[in-house]
Structures are given as structure tokens and as C-alpha cells.
Amino acid sequence: MDKLVIEGGYPLEGEVCISGAKNAALPILIASLLSDEPLNLQNVPYLQDIETCIDLLSALGVQVKHKEASCLLQANHVTNFDAPYGLVKTMRASILVLGPLLAKYGEARVSLPGGCAIGSRPVDIHIKGLELMGAKLIIDKGYISATTAHLPNKKLQGCSIFMDQVTVGGTENLMMAAVLAEGETILENAAKEPEIVDLGNCLIKMGAIIDGLGTDKIIIQGVSSLKEASYKIMFDRIEAGTFMVAAAMTGGKVVCKNINPEEMESITQKIKESGAKVEVREDSILVCGNKKLESVKIITAPYPAFPTDMQAQFMALNVVAEGVGEITETIFENRFMHAQELIRMGAEIDIKQNTAITKGGNILTGANVMATDLRASASLVLAGLVAKGKTTIERIYHLDRGYEKLEAKFNILGAKIKRLN
């Protein structure tokens, strides 16, 4: 099992090209199930989750040609509608095949998903929405079995769906199901993340009729079939944010390229509050660190508020910045597991229910630490970059799920990171 060894104390300087977004690429890859025609994708990140998704689609019968950042998919010979536990257990996004399989083929059997151990992320909203569209679903022995055989033309029926809570995965699953349903579907209290918009724009290029992307009310007019399309996946907001925090923490000077700064505003604002200098350009952001950073207060919430996927990185910043910081996690109930590992490196963190209070100004010391989930891994890398001595991070397979060539990109900027097997 691989691990990273980081020698801290080197300021980062230079330019980094931000990869395509994992959280946009996964549902867009799965959207290929909705059409018999080819879907040609660009800016696909090279990640373990992407490989897992491609393995799952291939098992269902999708023809996939994946080379570097391009991926050509065609689903005109899908004969298997069973997504087994062995392929689903490591990636929660696998549940997203449920809606497309039901919409296109009228049946699906999908294992309840796995993924990071950051808390309960139930799929009840996915299930309730599909039931409102007329599907029959049964959960038995860890699998969701679904059918539309009893419906007119065996097709899902458009309807109005109010989601009890904002859910990115639920919005994606129901939106994909609705594009081939009969009639109009209205999704209320929908997620507004840029990755949702990216999926919607790809579906529109494939021939779907969708209005309201980026709002909490998405309206979909069902069509009979989708067509061939090419699409470039958006940049990864969380990767960009991670490099921005790294620049601030190390007192460096880093330009994050190939991004849309408008979609980074909640992160950019907190970087500015920490005392780092931020220069927003047309398609890039420059961050210059400050020797005396200030701790920040963060409350995670759905977009456009501060993203839960960035709170671990800012906890690493808070423990070395001056003053008392406060991070309140409102999305997941078990997402402070990295705090104990940061404490091993010398951080002062007090967890009270869903709030982490940090006492800043600490000098971190390299230690052996263990990654517990994807973004926790990133926080430990950031801590290692500024710690005295060497930090060894175990279980970095979490990191490889969501960051493309992370240590290579950091090393180009002047970091000293080695991957050991």
C-alpha cells in the first residue's frame, strides 16, 4: 500500500493547471447510459474513482475508449442492468446508474453504495423521487431492484418532486431519469452546484430539454432519445481550493490556471480573510501567502455557500494561523476524523458536536499519520508541507480517488514529496 513522505518547510511557487472535476465527471460518464449514440468527453481527470466508474459502465455493456484526458463512450449494447457490490462498494456515485438504467431500459438492480466513511448519506430521496415517477423499487439484501414494466410504454412518468433536503446526488439521479421520462418533471429544492450545471449542460448537448440549471427549481421536458455529443468537463473547484490553501500556508506564490473564478468565490473570500493576497484573473487565481495568517470562521452549507469538501484543508490552515478558528460542519456528521491526526502533529483542536475550535499559532512537527477519507488526506498533505521534519501519510489510496497526480503537481511548485510503496 502506497504512502507519502513529505519534507516540510518549502514555500510553493509557480503555476498549476487544475484538472477536470471528479464530481462532474462521474455523473457525466454515467449519463452515457442514456443514449445509443457516442458521447465524447474531454478534460476527464485520471483518478481511481474514474477508473472504478469506467469498470462499472463496462460491466453494464458500455463500450469505453479512455486515453489520457479523453473518454469515448457508447451504450448501444447494454444488456446487463446489475451493478454489483464488488464494483459499487468503493464509490458512492455508483448509485447514479439507477436513474439512467430505469429511464432507458426499464429495469435496474444496484447495490447500495459505499465510499468514504464521513457519515451517513442515505439514498432515500433518490428512491422516493423515482417512485413518484412511477417506478417500483424494492430494497433487499443490500440491493435496490427497480422496474417500470407496469407503466405505460414501460416509461417513467414526469411529475413534480420536492426534495426534503438539498442533495447533489439525488438531483443528478432524478435529472438523468427525467430526460427520458414521458412529460414534464419539476425538481424543487434542487442542488445548485456548478457540477449539477455541468451535467445539465452535457445532457442538453445530448438533446435533453432542461431549464433552471443553477437554481433550486429545475424543469425537464422528457424526450424520446438522446443524440451524439462532445463535451468538455469543468475544472475541479476542490483541487483549486486545495492549492490555494497550500500557497497561503507555505507563504508561497501560486497561480491556479484553467478555472472559472466566479465558481470559487466562497473559497476565495476565506483565503482573503486569512490575510493572504488574492488576485482574480479571467481564468486563473493568484494566491500569495502571508507570514502571519489569521484563523477564519467557516460554516459548511450547500452551494453557493462554503463547500464541505474544503473544510479539512482550512482546518490545516487554522491550526498554523494566528488566533482562534471555528469550523462548523452542517453536511456530514462524521467529517472531523482528520482532527486527531493533525493533533498528532502538534495542532490544538477541540471538537464540540459539529464544531471544531482551533487554537492557532502552532508549529507543526512531522509525524506518522493516517488518511481517513479523501479530503482528510489533503489536509494532512497541507500540514506536512509546513511541518518541521518529515511527515508520513499512510492509506493514501483515499487521496488517489480524488486528486490527479497531486504529489507531482506539488513537487513542480517546489514541495518535497515522495511516494513509497
Image (spheres, grey):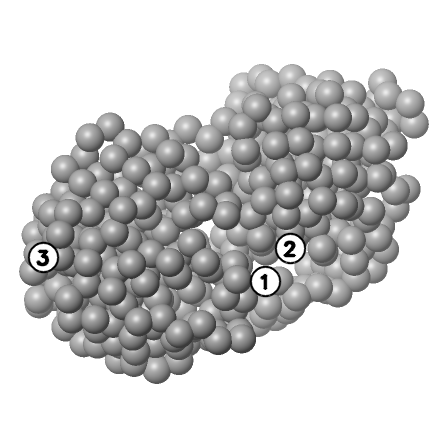
Q: Is residue 218 above or below residue 197?
A: above
* Disc sitting over residue 1 in the figure: none
Determine whether the residue tagged by mark 2 lies in a helix, strand or loop: helix
Residue position marked by numbered label 1 in the rendering? 234
Residue 185, x across and y down, in percent: 78, 32
Which label sits in the foreground, 2 or 3?
3
Q: Is residue 126 above or below residue 421?
A: above
* Disc sitting over residue 361 in the figure: 3
Q: 296 or 14: which is nearer to us?
A: 296
The amino acid type of the residue labelled 2 equals Asp
Residue 380 visible in image: no
**Residue at (25% x, 65% y) in the render:** 275
The amino acid type of the residue labelled 3 equals Gly
Q: Is residue 386 above or below residue 33?
A: below
Residue 172 visible in image: yes
Mark 2–mark 1 Cα distance, whole angstroms, equals 7 Å
The answer to the question of whether label 2 and label 1 lie on touching residues, with beta carbons closer than 8 A, is yes
Q: Quadrant of residue 349?
A: top left
Mark 1–mark 3 Cα distance, whole angstroms, equals 36 Å
Residue position marked by numbered label 2 in the rendering? 198
**Residue at (28% x, 53% y) in the render:** 314
Quadrant of the snapshot with the N terminus: bottom left
